[in-house]
Amino acid sequence: MTPRLRVDLTRSFTWGFTATAGALVALWLATGVATLASVAVSVALAVFLALALNPVVGWLQRHRLSKAMAITVVFAGFVLVFAGVIWVVVPMVVTQIGAFAAAVPQYLTDMRNRGPLKVWLTSGVYAASVAVGFMMSSNSTGVSFPSLR
């Protein structure tokens, strides 16, 4: 008589239930970590700034300022420096965005006249290979590369 394969349904159910529960817990934990990622970045940035600015607070305390006043002065200085950087960077970015927006019609005209593939080929490796005379001939491979200019 041939042996029969016996399947214990209670054991299979237990294994399947445990695997599904484990997968759901792992998914729940991954979702929680993803949700907390933005909070963790904010906390890490705050800790870094506090540690970086603490020596300045200590120096101000040694020069007869109370801790609260030293923290206020450092915070105000940090805000002023941050505002100064924004004041310098934002006008440059706005100017560059305006220049790009003004140049977009010319870019589109160039792409219509020459085509994006043609622009890429004439400015890239293909143009360099043409410049040094390294072209594949139709005799060796059966493929020829016409000049794009």
Image (cartoon, helix red, strand yellow):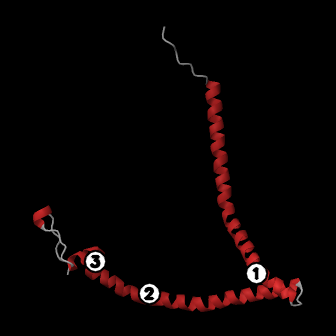
Residue 7 at what x, y percent from top left? Answer: 57, 22
Q: Element type at marker 3?
A: loop
Circle 2 sits on which residue? Answer: 100
Frontmost residue, 38 versus 134? 134
Whichever of labels 3 and 1 marks the residue nearer the N terminus, that label is 1
Q: How many marks?
A: 3
Residue name at image x 45 percent, y 90 percent? 99
Amino acid type indicated by mark 1: Leu
Q: Mark 3 or mark 1, which is nearer to you?
A: 1
Name the amino acid type tagged 2: Phe
Mark 2 to mark 3: distance in Å? Answer: 20 Å
Q: Which mark is residue 86?
A: none
The residue identified by callout 3 is: 115
In this rendering, position of residue 32 left or right of residue 100: right
Depth order, front residue of 73/7 = 73
Instruction: Residue 43: give x, y in percent of width and height.
Output: 73, 69
Residue 131: image quadrant is bottom left
Circles 2 and 3: CB distance less than 8 Å?
A: no
Position in image of residue 79 (x %, y %): 72, 86
Mark 3 burial class by Cα count in 10 Å: few <14, some 14-19, many 20+: few
1 vs 2, front mark: 1
- Whether residue 121 can be seen here: yes
Q: Relative to 25, say whether 129 is above or below.
A: below
Q: Residues within 10 Å of mark 2 (few under 14, many from 20)?
A: few
Q: Nearer the viewer, residue 111 or 19?
A: 19
Q: Residue at x 35, y 84 (%)?
A: 107
Left or right position of 29 against 120: right
Q: Which mark is residue 53?
A: 1
Say whether residue 73 is left or right of residue 139: right
Please name the amino acid that badge 3 sits on. Answer: Gly
